[in-house]
Image (spheres, coloured by chain):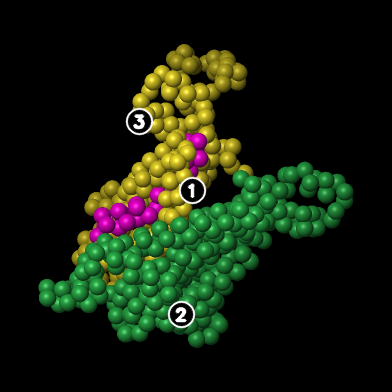
Chain colours: A yellow, B green
Amino acid sequence: MSTVERHDSPFRRMKAAAVEDYIAPSPWTMLRRRVFGNAGLVVGGTIFALIVLMALAAPLIAPHDPYAQSLANRLVPPIWHADGTWIHPLGTDGLGRDYLSRLIYGSRISLIIGLATALVSGFIGATLGICAGYFGGRVDMVISYIITTRLAMPVVLVALAVVAIVGTSLQLIILVLGLLLWDQFAVVTRSATMQVRAQEFVTAAEALGCSRLRLLCSEILPNVMNPLIVVMTLEMANAILLEAALSFLGLGVQPPLPSWGLMVAEAKPHMFFMAWIIMLPGAALFALVLSIYLVGDGIRDVTAPENRN
Amino acid sequence: MLLYTLRRLLLAVLVAFTVSIISFGLLRLSGDLAAAIAGPEATEAQIEAIRVDFGLDQPLVMQYVDWLLGALRFDFGNSFYFRDSVVSLVADRLPVTLTLGALAIMFALIVSIPLGVLAAVKQNTWIDRSALTIAVSGQAMPSFWFALILILVFAVNLRWLPVSGSGTWAHFILPAVALGYYATPAIMRLTRTGMLDVLASDYIRTARAKGVRPGKVLFKHALRNAVIPVVALAVVQFGFILSGSIVIETIFSLQGLGLLMWESIGRRDFPVVQAVLLLIAMMYVALAFIADLLNAWLDPRIRVA
């Protein structure tokens, strides 16, 4: 290929194209084509990347301090209203705090909750699932029982009750949600591990005298990673929605932190006169969660096209 | 079938027992209940008095046995706030939540099954794609936000339905839609995949070859088989709806279990919180059991496995 770049001529280009016709494209090229051919993945990935960038660069792009109150500037309408101003492009909330800045900082909370919860629950779920799938027998029976029991716990109610007693903090919410949302990880890794376990390279590793831990971590885990990542996106979205619901009920992230769910709750008394005040944080949540779902669906289609229907 | 039922029943009882231990333990171990009841201004002596009063100084196992024996006789003690028995409180609120849940699951089924069938019949057309888009956005929509939008549109702007309360049947429509929409995507997806599988099978081709009318093939031959897993899913979703009703009931001030639980958390009325938690968890277990049996009854292949 490098010769083509150096002596570019129509003839050489034709020859290169002809060569490409019967030489199969490299796996990376195939992957790239599949990734960029998947509209959902591209759109979702772009929105998600933008929100992540927004969260990382929050101090640089937020026009105001998200906590600075100004009672003289309460409930300023956003720019598309007749009396909106560019000082507060998305208006201000009931305490005169700049809405755009709060929305920008709010993305940090949602992303942290989503990522951290998915990591905690992914660790618990994947460990249980791999053990159940690999060892089978009694171990599988016990772990399946734990999964069944976990599925019988109403997540929202348990989270609410625990948070109400222990108190509310970001770390605590992550811990509680992480301890509750591992079930899908366990179910998916369990069945994936069962399939991988029956394959010959696992038997080969066993015959070579590979240690248990090494076998599980470097033979099984990489091969169940794809479905695991898909579940991770789902649970991330789930955790973000749950945090928003808890904060909305007043038992999640506490004021003055700019959680999007809490912002909807704070805006609720004003919503009958100005709909935008609940629309903005809700739309932000919707966009973030939707983008995560699209990325998850996209990854599933790209990594396991045979599961698509 | 009998053996299968017994095995499942045993599992359900075991799970119910474990769940009762966990839901009891969660509330006892996750903090000092006496201090939580007494509130932030209480003195050490007052907290100690409450501890003795409510038997919180006893060993945890004794407390659990006491509570479980009571729970088995439907005695959950008295509410701290209402000074009334928890059971009568819960019994007052239960019908509202069950009505709401039933309406919500009905709404979900009415919307999602036709959409799922349509999406499968018109696979890979714009109809299919827009049905899937509705499903994905349904999952991504925060339920409380959707409920508030419904209020703004149908109660405030159009003035068709009341904003909140639980007086008449009209009060149930918006909450049921808000709650049911949450269950729609999953049911729709399952109906669609079920229909796709069934439509590709040999007996459908045979039926078509015999010259059975397309409508009859679709509804009598295909849908009946495709809907089998949906029945069980709907039962499980009903459980999710019951627990999700806390958010919706709070928004619409529907006097159901969810609102009771939320208010009780605010009032630190833990006997009520514990009873509602246990009740909903037990309903989950029961619903999962029913879903298993329904599956096995409708699809004999499961019974053997």
Which residue in the protein does label 1 denote?
A294
A46 in relation to B77, above or below:
above
- Please tell me whether mark 2 sits on a helix, a strand or a loop: helix
Which residue in the protein does label 3 denote?
A213
Q: Chain of mark 2?
A: B
A68 in relation to A226, above or below:
below
Q: Residue furthest left?
A: B44
Q: Which residues are magenta?
A: A169-194
- Give the quarter of the figure containing the N terminus of chain B: bottom right
Give the residue at x 42% y 55%.
A150
Q: Is residue B192 magenta?
A: no
Q: Quadrant of residue A94?
A: bottom left
- Disc 2 with disc 1 on a shared chain: no
Who is closer to the viewer here, B120 or A178? A178
Q: Chain of mark 1?
A: A
Give the residue at x 58% y 40%.
A307
- Give the quarter of the figure containing the C terminus of chain B: top right
- Please tell me whether mark 3 sits on a helix, a strand or a loop: helix
| Image coords of residue B35 (percent x, y) | 19, 71
User: Of circles 2 and 1, which is in front?
Assistant: 2
Q: Amino acid at mark 2?
A: Ala
Which residue in the protein does label 2 denote?
B91
Who is closer to the viewer here, B100 or B305? B305
Q: Pointers 2 and 1 in contact (CB under 8 A)?
A: no
| Image coords of residue B233 (percent x, y) | 57, 58
